[in-house]
Amino acid sequence: MKPLKITAVSYLNTFPFVHGITKSGLLQDFELDLQIPSLCGKKLVSGETDIALVPVAAIHNHPEFEIYTDFCIGCNGRVKTVLLLSKVPVDKIENIYLDYDSTTSVNLIKVLCKFYWKINPLWIPMKNSIDQNEKYESIVAIGDKTFELEKKYPFSYDLGEMWRNFTGLPFVFACWAGKKGISKEMIKDLNAALSWGIYHIPESIETNPEKLFIPKDEAIKYLQSDINFILDKDKKDAMQLFYKYLDMLVESTQE
């Protein structure tokens, strides 16, 4: 049997998953690859990987993807690392740059702008990663870089918190998904490894000290309080509502 090819995200919020996959001993035959979120779904489409931590917006666009585990990258409000950063208040925004690394968050900001804030900015997709030395008028930024980038802007809007204010629901940014054909035994072992990882968060931080952008205690608090890893019913309901808004966005552009 070929090893299970797994693609995960190369951010702090995935440390517990990576730790569980690589250190728990519960998953025996695998190959692990780390990518930015926007590339995880693309690698699954191309067949370069068997299962990936896929942005939920990409899952919506690919009905052939199946969600295979009980875990996700989600939040129950404030998430800290998915932000709209701006020089001006949200009602004054004219242009929003969209993080090259993101798939779900660039769709979430469009939903929030249209249906929550009721503004209509110009969208500017970035062709490369964010330049930390450039101060954009307004920008959606995700991942570890937000810890430093946020300090440069007078206005910061946490998209997990904004979605919660808008809908009263949690939010899911990415789920473990793959194409049909992965064995039940492999999925069982992966679920067990992921579960082990989220119960060993401090250890997951200690094994990757060179990748930390913030102090260890702050990183542990972020993973234990701001990120929620369990794909429960409320999160599944939130995903379905998000998909409805994405469909409404498409319909509005076709009118």
Image (cartoon, rainbow, N blue to C red):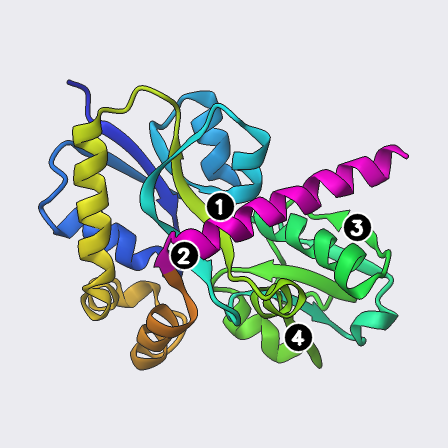
Q: List x then y, in percent, for residue 152.
A: 65, 77
Crowding at label 4, few (<14), some or many (≥20) Cα neighbours within 10 Å? many
Q: Which mark is residue 6?
A: none
Q: Which residue is mark 3?
A: 123
| Left or right of residue 170, residue 17 in this image | left
Q: CA distance from mark 3 to mark 4?
A: 18 Å
Label 2, label 4: how many angstroms apart (C-alpha)?
20 Å
Which is nearer the N-term, disc 1 or disc 3? Answer: 1
Residue at image x 84%, y 61%? 118
Q: Secondary structure at mark 3?
A: strand
Q: Main secondary structure of the magenta part?
A: helix
- Sequence-first disc among 2 and 1: 2
Nearest to the observer: residue 156 or residue 126: 156
Give the residue at x 39% y 63%: 228
User: Which of the marked residues, 2 or 3, is nearer the chain's N terminus?
Assistant: 2
**Label 1 sits on residue:** 37
Mark 4, secondary structure of its residue: strand
Amino acid bearing label 4? Ser
Tag 2: residue type?
Tyr
- Callout 1 touching callout 4 (CB < 8 Å): no
Residue 156: give its label. Answer: 4
The magenta stretch is 229-255
Q: Which residue is mark 2?
A: 11
Q: Quadrant of the N terminus?
A: top left
Say whether marks 2 and 1 touch (CB < 8 Å).
yes
Residue 236 on the magenta segment = yes
Label 1 – label 4 distance at C-alpha: 22 Å
